Image: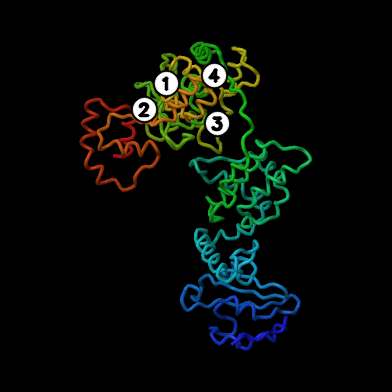
Amino acid sequence: MAPKNPATSIRKEEFDLKTLLQGHPAAIIKGKFSFTFKDQYIDSLPFINDKNKCVELTHYSSDDEKYNEKNKPRLKLRIGNSVKTFYIVYDKNRRQKIGNWMTRTKSGHYPKGFFSVTQAKEEFKRLVSDAEKINPEKWKYQSFTLRTYLLEHYKNDRENKSNKRNSLSPVTDKTIREISSAFEPWLDLKLSEFNEDHPVIFKKYWQNKETPITSETMRKYYSLLNSLFNMCVTCTYLPKNKIDRHIFLFPRNPKRPVTTYTDPTNEVVEFIFDEDTPGGGDSKIIVATMFLCGARNSEIYRNTSNNFNINDRTIRIPEHISKNKAARIVAIESDSYWNYVAKYKTLKSLSDREGELMFPCCREAKAPHVTSSLYQKTWQAVKKEFNFPKIGRLYDARHTFAKKALESGVPIQDLSKITGHSLETLMNYYIDNNISQATREKLRSATNSNAAIKVQQETNFPPSVNSLYESYVRRCIKKNIKDELSTFVQEMKDLGDQNQLNAEQIFWLKEML
């Protein structure tokens, strides 16, 4: 039987579900405002012509009981004077708009924000699943605008919640001002309303500004907002960061020439440790370490005392502070350096207890360790003494180490493991342009070959162990390996007794066993 053609609109008091759906004998109606949603049924229902009034209907499903349980999320349809809109009602205090109803199309494509019944049910399930990840007490944050969260809550969250690298990363007032300025048109948009389309919208907006904005600056702005949404996920205000994974839209500006320093490293280090050079022991060790092993500054000042091994003359950089999330061990062959480190540890009463910071912050601060501001006096003194260029940064000491290492004949694969650089980065930044094309091609071939990979991961392990160690190197550690472990533990102990394991392998064994 064909459905009746209802009036275009009626008064709310005239709305009677059974009467309006009587042309659909198969329709399942439960109560005054509940029925099984189908497109043809919804199409039969008239709009409400009363100003500021609407009718709210609940979906009933005989197949899916979760639609019918009390105190569970319910799929609702609100009929107003011109649109029919799907909602989720989580509880008496929480509801969320899904989108407007639209009859099913033959192509299966719908304008953004419009849903058929089938699509609305799918979106309902997805949103309910996301909502389960949010603390109900924090639901209010979803309705906060970017302006409200940014100005009233973001700073406090950054001071008290660890980031993805498991460390506190306080945000500055300058950063908050930058976000406010860069995203001014979206400041009054709710946090929950940002989606995967917005990065493209941001880019078009910045490209059309009267004052040109470089791609690098766009990249910075996007990263700042992306960090904000990552914090919202960390704090369980949002189930996920919908603007994430769009950094590719904002490519870096062409690489600038790498700045390196030509002065002998030993002379620089001797000057750093001179009594008359400004800065405390922590400041001097950090600056010297960057010249001697090419580590990143954050990999040094965030490190712990037990990772500065005076006997082995090595520094271990654990995975949680490494940029590429891979632990590594670097050697420093400098008597002056290790003598100074030994004195510093004694003076500071530092032990080799795991977790004890090598460079703890001695004043009340947001981070437990020192930061880059600590070593500026020492670094400026070095720049002045050796006449380094004004644009020179301490980070360029890392570049200097890499360049000198390659020039002295250190294999590029070994340098990759020492510095934590990718082979591609080393090729792009540190291989001189005046090297013959043939040589460069050979290097590229070597770094991209299976042989190069084998060199990187060559071990003294027996075949039964190699696969596990390679998984560790690639950061793909197996979760259920107890049975496998029991089969080779003794082999490992035997190898250790025979001094056939290197330092990295020993650290791995300690972590795994």
Q: Do callouts 4 and 1 mark residues in contact (Cβ within 8 Å)?
A: no
Q: Which residue is mark 1?
A: 411
Q: What residue sits 58% from the left and 20% below the top?
A: 379
Q: Which residue is mark 2?
A: 455
Q: Is residue 429 above or below residue 4?
A: above
- Mark closer to the observer (3, 2): 2
Amino acid residing under circle 2: Val
Q: Quadrant of residue 510?
A: top left
Q: Quadrant of the C terminus?
A: top left
Q: Position of residue 207 (x, y in %)?
A: 72, 42
Q: Do callouts 3 and 2 mark residues in contact (Cβ within 8 Å)?
A: no
Q: What residue sits 61% from the left and 28% below the top?
A: 255
**How many angstroms separate mark 2 from mark 1 (CA)?**
10 Å
Q: Which residue is mark 4?
A: 432
Q: Secondary structure at mark 4?
A: loop
Q: Secondary structure at mark 1?
A: loop
